[in-house]
Amino acid sequence: MKQETKKIIIWTILFAIAMGFMETAVVVYLRELYYPDGFKFPLTVIPNKVAVTEFWREIATIIMLVGTGIIAGKTKLTRFAYFIMAFAIWDIFYYVFLYVLIAWPQSLLTWDILFLVPVPWVGPVLAPCLVSLEMIVFAYCIIYFKEKDSRIKVSVSQWLLLISGVLVIIMSFTTDYIEQVSQSSVDNWNIFSESQLFEELKTYTPKEFCWWLFWVGDALCALGVLSFVKTCVRDCSGNPFLRNEKKSEA
């Protein structure tokens, strides 16, 4: 791998780790305000002004991570790779710093509120961490093989596997919440609501994470990544330019 690429990867990692700390800092402040006795379910009702701010903060975070990918990458595919790499590292170190600062989560199976867009996502900490690790592997493979052969791309069938897997995983994170809300007489919160965030779930406590749905989605993503790697290995080994390059190096 070229020295320039290594530098870009290192700075992407450092940026993502720093963003992870910033995210942790915000959550530490919020928990001091709304969960002084420790974060737990049922969720504390949050004033609408704070809820709207938090909603847009999460949107801003995604924009910053996308921007990182756009700046770091030179092609559409490598920009996507740097984006998901930064996203995954940010997510993992968010939990690392939470544990360092406030000794939370107690275990990888501790439930957390993962995201607010378009509805709250909930699940054990282990689940998003596993997804993040897979994203890092996929991102590195894209960058590595793209540098070996600029013609490398993700096929339509591979994209379908990856997108389907992601949608199924998102379903696993939102199923429990949606089921609870559907039984509530209070409308689900959105940024135009006059109600407060989590008012619809004053008594909500997660019951059981839909692991089977998560594993189905994760398997689809893994198949997409493995198919991509297999295609790249085949195409790179069959590239006459690369074969000649290896001979000259020998």
Image: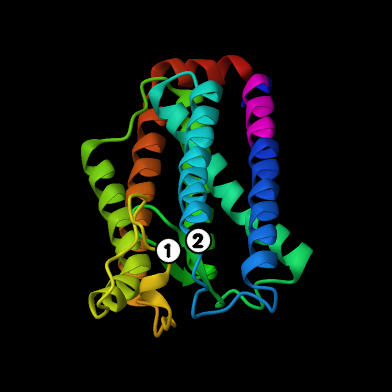
Q: Amino acid at mark 1?
A: Gln
In this rendering, position of residue 37 left or right of residue 182: right
Sort mark 1 into few (<14), some (14-19) or many (20+) by Cα contacts within 10 Å: some
Disc 2: which residue: 47
* x, y percent for residue 155: 26, 35
Q: Residue at horizontal 66%, vertical 20%?
A: 4
As helix, strand or loop, the secondary structure at mark 1 comes to: loop
Disc 1: which residue: 196
The magenta segment is 4-12
Q: On residue 167, which mark appears?
A: none
- Figure check: 3 above or below 140: above
Q: Is residue 6 magenta?
A: yes
Q: Main secondary structure of the magenta part?
A: helix
Q: Amino acid at mark 2?
A: Pro
Q: Mark 2 or mark 1: which comes first in sequence? A: 2
Q: How is the image coloured?
A: rainbow
As helix, strand or loop, the secondary structure at mark 2 comes to: loop
Q: Residue at horizontal 39%, vertical 76%?
A: 201
Q: Nearer the viewer, residue 243 or 184?
A: 184
Position of the C terminus by quadrant: top right
Q: Residue at horizontal 69%, vertical 74%?
A: 36
What's the CA distance linking mark 2 and mark 1?
Answer: 5 Å
Q: Nearer the viewer, residue 219 or 18?
A: 18
* x, y percent for residue 245: 53, 16
